[in-house]
Amino acid sequence: MAALRYLAALGAALLLHLIGARIHPNLPQAIDWFLPVLVLLALSGSSFAGIAGGLAAGLLQDGLTGGLYGLHGFADTVVGYATARLAQRLVIQRAVGVFAIASFASALQQVILIALSLFLLPQASVPEPFWVVVRALSTGLVGMLIYSGSDRFRKAAESHRKQRLSRLRMDATK
Amino acid sequence: MDEKRAGWLLLVTLVAQLALLGLQVPGAGGKGTFLGVLGLRVIGPFARGITGASRTIGDSTENLRFQQRLVAENRRLRHEVEDLHLRLLQFEDVRSEAARLAAALRYAPPPIGDLRAADVVYLDFSSWLTTLVIYAGGPPVKVDQVVLAPTGLVGRVVEVASPYAKVQLLTDRAASVGALIVRTRRQGVLRGAGSGTLDLEYIPIQADVRAGDRVLTAGIDGIFPRGIPVGTVVSVKQLGQLFHEIRVAPAVDLGTLDQVYLLDWKPVPKNLEEAVADGRP
């Protein structure tokens, strides 16, 4: 079920990515829709989920870019695992924490991508530092917004469920 | 799954991916790889669906917005067509004169080739791994096929997953084109600067180059035919003792591409291109 949910989230990220590129071709440089999804999955603390999720998200991104197939796959696998290991050691209960972790994950991903490109491609072009920072911050922001949105939704659903249960009990006592 | 197993899994996954990446490196020059083609085949139709939907929505809103302006635009375009007809007549005259002179000199100009339109499915020119995916139904697209826009050169096809194809943009850092400055006919090599601009290299210090000079393809690289507009010189600096540092703005606004044109022409055959001076292939 979690895997299906993750795949659906990746599908939504792909949709947003393509719509963004259609609106303005600069947008994919500024916002990474896939990484927040991966970070939120890896925050569950499962290393396996981090590795598998990173691999899936990365290979999907590789289909969209013009470089070697597997660059993002490699980077996102490392990022997914690292985030999962980090989540095992830290207790993240606030949206700001998610922002920090997602930003860190984005920075790590870009560093790995740059290193791999320089290593493997004869004439690799490195992104400008400004865009690296923008992408890291936007990834953190998107991650934080999704986290707080889903948290609120979960709480609202929980309180609604409790209200319904208490009403049922009252009806039963009448 | 315990952490030790997860660590092993990570190691195996990364090593496998590195091996796959390593296998692709010889093909990075642009011939395309199995995985790249597979990725293009899977994502191409999805991206085309999104593009088609957004184009339909955009077109319908635009139609509503500009309906009233259509009559005026139509009138203006009619005048423009008349003007172009007149210019065409002049060019026909010049062309027939050029053909006459060429015949007198027994010079046979190379064929220009045929154009066919292709829809842009996905464009991500700003990222450091620049990509343009096109959809071209009909006859299959070929690797190294030249891609044009109405205002000039866009790039060349590097990967084909019929009917989709991936195009290396002119601004990509790995792209290079033989080019010449129209005013002085000085030839150099144009390379993508990676930031949406181009660098014209190997133009010696003695050469006369000015900002505003137009740059065309020189037809010396065996891929791009001669005479396609590439861009305009925006700045000229002295780089060391030998060459100018020339920055060129592309002729095509790559961010606004909706449709491109594939040029069918016969480039220089590979065996001829690789032949050595003594005549042995």
Image (spheres, helix red, strand yellow):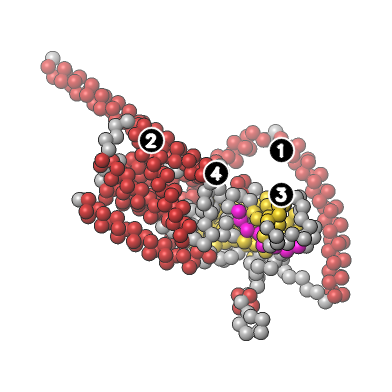
Decide which of tag 3 and tag 1 comes sooner along the chain. Answer: 1
Whether pointer 3 and pointer 1 mark residues with C-beta atoms closer than 8 Å, the reply is no
Discs 3 and 1 carry the same chain letter: yes
Q: Residues within 10 Å of mark 1 (few under 14, many from 20)?
A: few
Structural distance between the alpha carbons of marks 1 and 4: 31 Å
User: Which residue is drawn at the image coordinates 65% and 67% (left, top)?
Assistant: B221
Q: Which mark is residue B234?
A: 3
Could you say whether the residue bearing mark 2 is in a helix, strand or loop? helix
Discs 1 and 4 carry the same chain letter: no
Instruction: Identify the residue under disc 4.
Output: A26
Discs 4 and 2 carry the same chain letter: yes
For mark 4, name the chain.
A
Is residue A54 shown left or right of residue B172?
left
Q: Nearer the viewer, residue B202 or A173?
A: B202
User: Which residue is drawn at the image coordinates 87% and 66% (left, top)?
Assistant: B97
Discs 2 and 1 carry the same chain letter: no
Q: Position of residue B177 (x, y in %)?
A: 65, 62
Q: Residues within 10 Å of mark 2 (few under 14, many from 20)?
A: many
In terms of secondary structure, what is the magenta stretch mainly? strand
The type of residue carrying mark 2 is: Phe
Structural distance between the alpha carbons of marks 2 and 1: 49 Å
Q: Which mark is residue B70?
A: 1
Whether pointer 4 and pointer 2 mark residues with C-beta atoms closer than 8 Å, the reply is no
Q: Nearer the viewer, residue B157 or A91?
A: A91
Provide the residue span drawn in magenta: B186-193
Instruction: Identify the residue under disc 2.
Output: A99
User: Which residue is drawn at the image coordinates 46% and 61% (left, top)?
Assistant: A120
Give the residue at the far top of this rendering.
A174
Q: Which mark is residue B83?
A: none
Give the residue at the far front of this rendering.
B241
